[in-house]
Amino acid sequence: MMFYTTITGWLLYYFVHTIKGDFTGLNADQVGGFFSSMLGKPGSMTAWMILAVVLGLLPVAKGLQSGVEKNYKADDDRSSHVDARTRIQQHAARWCWRRSEVLLGS
């Protein structure tokens, strides 16, 4: 997993510098030198990796709190006689169905 967060940090670094126009007029060798310069700054690379992790955690945390947990609590009140495993399976199926409706625009 650390590999993906590191690469995502690199992508964010390049994205910001691209938006700022730092690569304008540079040839491939100069952009390669830019990358080598970045690799020589472990503090900067760590900061970009941490930003990538935080950006990845925010939607996951929000999704769990406002989606899965909220719906699971409502299901718990309605079907107390059904075992927990069945409730989780039912909830997962409903959650997937709702997400597919959103994605497909139904």
Image (cartoon, rainbow, N blue to C red):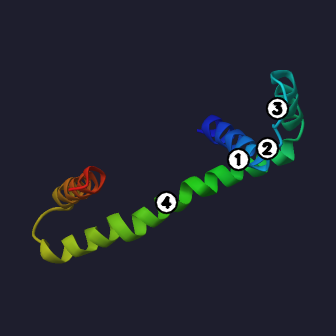
Marks 1,3: beta carbons within 8 A: no
Q: In which quarter of the image is the N terminus?
A: top right
Q: Say what amino acid the circle numbered 3 marks.
A: Phe
- Checking the image for residue 96, the label placed there is none
Q: Say what amino acid the circle numbered 4 marks.
A: Pro
Closest to the observer: 84 or 50? 50
For the point 79% across and 49% down, the residue is: 20
Q: Say what amino acid the circle numbered 2 marks.
A: Met
The first of marks 2 and 4 along the sequence is 2
Closest to the observer: 8 or 30? 30
Above or below, 84 against 8 in this view is below
Q: Name the residue under label 2.
A: 45
- Checking the image for residue 59, the label placed there is 4
For the point 24% across and 58% down, the residue is: 98
Which element is circle 3 on? Answer: helix
Q: In which quarter of the image is the C terminus?
A: bottom left
